[in-house]
Amino acid sequence: FYPLLTLAAVAGVWAAGLPPFQAVIHSLSAVSTGGFSGFSGSLADVPSSARFTLLAAAFLGALPLVLLYRGLSGGWVELRHDLELRALAAAVLITALGLWLFANAAAPDVLAQALSAQTGTGFSTIDIHALDPQAKLVLILSMVTGAGIGSTAGGVKLLRVLILIRVVQITLLRVHMPRHAVLEPELGGRALRPEQIQHALVVALLFLAVI
């Protein structure tokens, strides 16, 4: 799927006006979340239509590969209830809202920067150096959480973050429940196995330890 996505991005960006070499390196960076740009201003120097194509490719590249396969084989409409897809969209909007509150930038630039950070692409549409510390913290948290498991994005991954949040929620609820009450951890209507919880916890701790 990734070669097809990359070729589609190259064709779209090339048609939008970027030279062939620039179209190739920007598309490779968008799909593999490399963040390399041939322009000093990164995506700020890219035409708006080409920018939209690159960000769309970055969003698709940040989704789990299994999810993309399901979309191609069974139809994209069936994926609208997928937990990771909704989590990624929500995370991008939350990041955009945080940037809008703390960064003096236009709404399209804020949304593009949020999408770039959450997917781990690394492109920039605004001057990151000039941002307030609060806005930089929003971007850091966005990049740390990352996107879908099994994607090219970095970070802890959103599903693991959701698992940890759910475990904390269950732990707090059990404090106020009778001893004989049973409350099994579940997420998105599916039961969480102990090994899933352990894996999410270990990955998150190792990620922070390496940093």
Image (cartoon, rainbow, N blue to C red):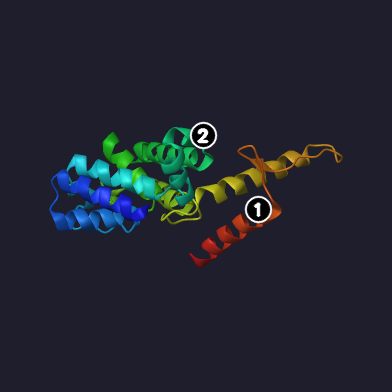
Q: Which residue is mark 2?
A: 81
x, y percentage for residue 42?
22, 52
Q: Residue at x 41, y 56 (%)?
A: 152
Q: In this rendering, would 86 be left or right of 123?
A: right
x, y percentage for residue 169?
66, 41
Q: In this rendering, would 56 be left or right of 69?
A: left
SS class, disc 2: helix
Between 120 and 148, which is closer to the camera in this rendering?
148
Between 41 and 88, which is closer to the camera in this rendering?
88
Q: In this rendering, would 175 be left or right of 23?
A: right
Q: Amino acid at mark 1?
A: Ile
How many residues crowd around disc 1 within 10 Å: few (fewer than 14), some, or many (20 or more)? some
Q: Which residue is mark 1?
A: 197
CB under 8 Å between discs 2 and 1? no
Q: Amino acid at mark 2?
A: His
Q: Earlier in the sequence, mark 2 or mark 1?
A: 2
Q: Residue at x 22, y 51 (%)?
A: 10
